[in-house]
Image (cartoon, rainbow, N blue to C red):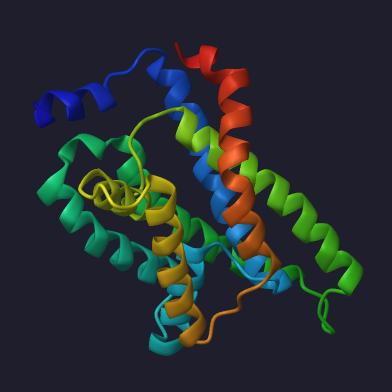
Amino acid sequence: MNIERIAANFLRPRMGRRLAVLTASLITIGICVAVFKTVGFGTDPCSTFTLGVSAHTGMSFGTCQLIFNLLMFLPVIRFDLSRIGVGTVANMAGIGYVADFSIWLIQMWTPSGGFSLTARVLMFVVSMAAFLIAAAFYMVVDLGVAPYDAIPQLIAARTSRLSARAVRVAWDFSVLSAGFLLGATVGLTTLITGFCLGPAITSVSTRVKSWFE
């Protein structure tokens, strides 16, 4: 039953360790999104869309992220409650506001002429590595998936014509295109997260999965 599977997502082995890693991962992802926005090399597809909406509405990135996640949460509730866990809720409400706070802090320390290209590239490289590792750990702790990630999984589970990977690529491209049309930056960050996140999750999982069993 779905209710039993939801309960299982909240009662996992080594729950304390899972929650600690989940919290650290989400905070790290939020900080990295803030750095990505600052250096101007684009962001991941979901953040690209919400940054575009934020620019057009005047709402903070965190609020736009929360509203977008709530809208995506509705079909998840309707079709597959088993994907919901504490990680789902934490992702919906946490990353965007961590990014907002981090952007505010970065702006306080930004030089009057802005960061140099060298500084921006260095910030980008460090943040990208941290983002990939943190996102991989978020998946490995297995406490529920974000609504954004659940939607293509739901679609793939209900179609036999397209593979799960094809559905995910189409989903990311659609959301990314909407963000681009809204004026958000699409760049190197977008490409790297698209191509490298999967391998990063696999690499981290094989090394640390035993920590949570």
Q: Quadrant of residue 58?
A: bottom left
Please say whether residue 105 is visible from this viewpoint: no
Q: Quadrant of residue 89?
A: top left
Give the left or right position of residue 193, taking residue 147 as reference. right
Q: Position of residue 61 (x, y in %)?
A: 45, 71
Q: Is residue 188 above or below residue 169?
A: below
Q: Is residue 163 above or below residue 176?
A: above
Residue furthest toward the front? 161
Q: Nearer the viewer, residue 211 or 204?
A: 204
Q: Is residue 77 above or below residue 122?
A: above
Q: Going 34% across and 52% down the picture, which residue do you hit?
A: 162
Q: Position of residue 85 (x, y in %)?
A: 28, 35
Indicate the quadrant containing the C terminus: top left, top right, bottom left or bottom right.
top left
Give the left or right position of residue 12, taking residue 200 as reference. left
Q: Going 61% across and 38% down the picture, which residue do you hit?
A: 199
Q: Position of residue 52 (x, y in %)?
A: 47, 80
Give the left or right position of residue 36, taking residue 125 as reference. left
